[in-house]
């Protein structure tokens, strides 16, 4: 399960949506990626932890954009 965020007109980043704390699914909420289980928050442009209890950020998934569509790299 992954999550894609837009970082520019044609730039995207992708991350595993699995929270590194205890494995719940992270989802967009406002301008952050938020885990509903214990409230960890992650930066949508880097996947870095903004607020614990997670100690590590979301795993990055390599993707590319071709013809306006996102593909695994
Ligand atoms: S499983 Fe995500 S904060 Fe605990």
Image: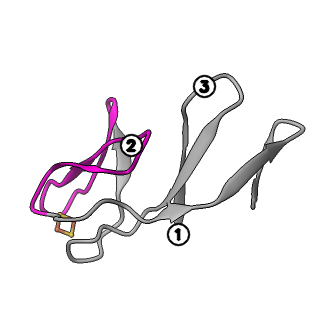
Read off the residue under disc 3: 8
Query: Closer to us: mark 3 or mark 1?
Result: 3
- Range drawn in magenta: 30-53
Q: The C terminus lies in which quarter of the figure?
A: bottom right
* Of callouts 1 and 2, the N-terminal one: 1
Q: Could you tell whether 53 is left or right of 47 in the image? A: left
User: Is label 2 or label 3 in front?
Assistant: 3
Q: Residues within 10 Å of mark 3 (few under 14, many from 20)?
A: few
Residue with the mark numbered 2: 28
| Residue at the image position 67 percent from the left and 22 percent from the top | 9
Q: Residue 43, image x and y in percent?
A: 33, 42
Mark 2 → mark 3, Cα distance in angstroms:
17 Å
Q: Number of marks in the image?
A: 3
Residue for point 30% across, 50% down? 48
Residue at point 44% right, 39% down?
A: 45
At 38% from the left and 69% from the top, the residue drawn is: 18
Residue 36 lies in the magenta stretch? yes
| Label 3 lies in ligand 1 vicinity (Cβ under 8 Å) | no
44 displayed left or right of 49:
right
Of callouts 2 and 3, the N-terminal one:
3
Q: Which residue is mark 1?
A: 1
Q: Which mark is residue 15?
A: none
- For numbered disc 3, what is the local secondary structure? loop
């Amino acid at each position: 399960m992954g999550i894609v965020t837009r970082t520019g007109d044609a730039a995207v980043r992708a991350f595993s949506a699995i929270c590194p704390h205890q494995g719940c699914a992270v989802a967009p909420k406002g301008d952050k990626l938020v885990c509903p289980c214990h409230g960890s928050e992650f930066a949508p442009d880097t996947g870095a932890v903004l607020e614990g209890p997670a100690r590590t950020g979301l795993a990055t998934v390599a993707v590319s954009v071709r013809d306006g569509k996102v593909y695994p790299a």
